[in-house]
Image (cartoon, rainbow, N blue to C red):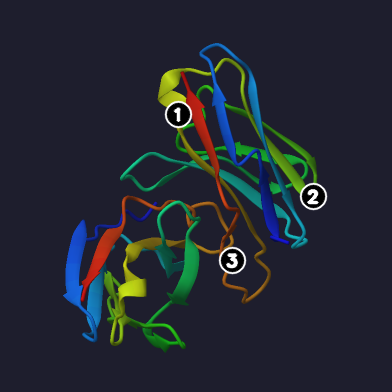
């Protein structure tokens, strides 16, 4: 089971780009990296998933270096509505080790 | 209507009572999960089921049991509730096939208070 380490919290001003890094030194060959967003009293919501290099969708970008021992979630031009907890999960998508959330990173966007 | 529905949404009960939280889904997914979230903490996996005949313990299964009555239904039971089971409980589903991401789809949560 690949353990992940994220900062506990981050603050950012509106309009800035935010980068949240996740460390996963013992990631396995079949493991993917998945990020979720959670607002208070709601269930987490899938943001993005990647295996290597860079993945981009309408919400975020995910940067994964060649050694895959870390990954960075990038949120462009954040707004107040991006205030949430962000979780990095690492595991085999077909198996059961992609189900562990940890404590996540609490992002606070400041006006 | 929500794809993943949890009932009840809120419940207050007393120590020693038996409680059942129910989850139903219309997504047609084979995989279903129960998570628990305590204030300020992340989600912890209680039980998971990859199909109707498959039930597995997660990180914190002690004090809980589950039943997968059908593909669409997955219930969580607390046989004898205790105060430290006071938490927000989430049901989730997923469907992994081929290149699918296997992303989890969550219900709206069931807030349980044990007095």
The quarter of the image holding the N terminus of chain B is bottom right
Question: Is label 3 on the same chain as label 2?
Answer: yes
Which residue occupies 68% across, 69% down?
A: B97
Q: Is residue A103 visible?
A: yes
Query: In this rendering, which labeled residue sits more in front, label 1 or label 3?
Result: 1
Q: Is residue A25 visible?
A: no
Residue nearer the viewer, A55 or B9: B9
Which residue occupies 60% across, 53% down?
A: B107
Q: Is residue B82 left or right of residue B56?
A: left
Q: Residues within 10 Å of mark 1 (few under 14, many from 20)?
A: many
Who comes first in sequence, dot 3 or dot 2?
Answer: 2
Q: Is residue B91 above or below residue B55?
A: below
- Residue matched to label 3: B102
Residue at mark 1: chain:
B
Disc marking residue B71: 2
Tell me the CA gap for discs 1 and 3: 29 Å
Q: Residues within 10 Å of mark 3 (few under 14, many from 20)?
A: many
Residue at mark 3: chain:
B
Percent position (x, y) of residue A78?
A: 29, 81
Residue at mark 2: chain:
B
Which residue occupies 41% across, 86% down?
A: A55
- Residue matched to label 1: B86
Residue pushed farthest right?
A: B70
Residue nearer the viewer, B38 or A50: B38
Q: Is residue A75 above or below residue A11?
A: below
Percent position (x, y) of residue A43?
A: 50, 55
Question: Is label 1 on the same chain as label 2?
Answer: yes
Question: Are the residues flagged by discs 1 and 3 in contact, CB closer than 8 Å?
Answer: no
Question: Are the residues flagged by discs 1 and 2 in contact, CB closer than 8 Å?
Answer: no
């Amino acid at each position: 089971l690949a353990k992940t380490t994220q900062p506990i919290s981050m603050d950012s001003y509106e309009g800035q780009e935010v980068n949240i890094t996740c460390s996963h030194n013992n990631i396995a060959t079949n493991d993917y990296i998945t990020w979720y967003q959670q607002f208070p009293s709601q269930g987490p919501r899938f943001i993005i998933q990647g295996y290597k290099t860079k993945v981009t969708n309408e919400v975020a970008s995910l940067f994964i270096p060649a050694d895959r021992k870390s990954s960075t979630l990038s949120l462009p031009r954040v707004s107040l509505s991006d205030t949430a907890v962000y979780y990095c999960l690492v595991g085999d998508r077909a198996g059961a080790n992609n189900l562990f959330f940890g404590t996540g990173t609490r992002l606070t966007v400041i006006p | 209507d929500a794809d993943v529905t949890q009932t009840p949404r809120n419940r207050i009960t007393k120590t020693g009572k038996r409680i059942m939280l129910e989850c139903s889904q219309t997504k047609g997914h084979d995989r279903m999960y129960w998570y628990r979230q305590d204030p300020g903490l992340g989600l912890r996996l209680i039980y998971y089921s990859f199909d109707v005949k498959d039930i597995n313990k997660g990180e914190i299964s002690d004090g809980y049991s589950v039943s997968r009555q059908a593909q669409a239904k997955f219930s969580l039971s607390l046989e004898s509730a205790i105060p430290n089971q006071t938490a927000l409980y989430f049901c989730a589903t997923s469907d992994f096939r081929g290149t699918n991401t296997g992303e989890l789809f969550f219900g709206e949560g069931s807030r349980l208070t044990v007095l």
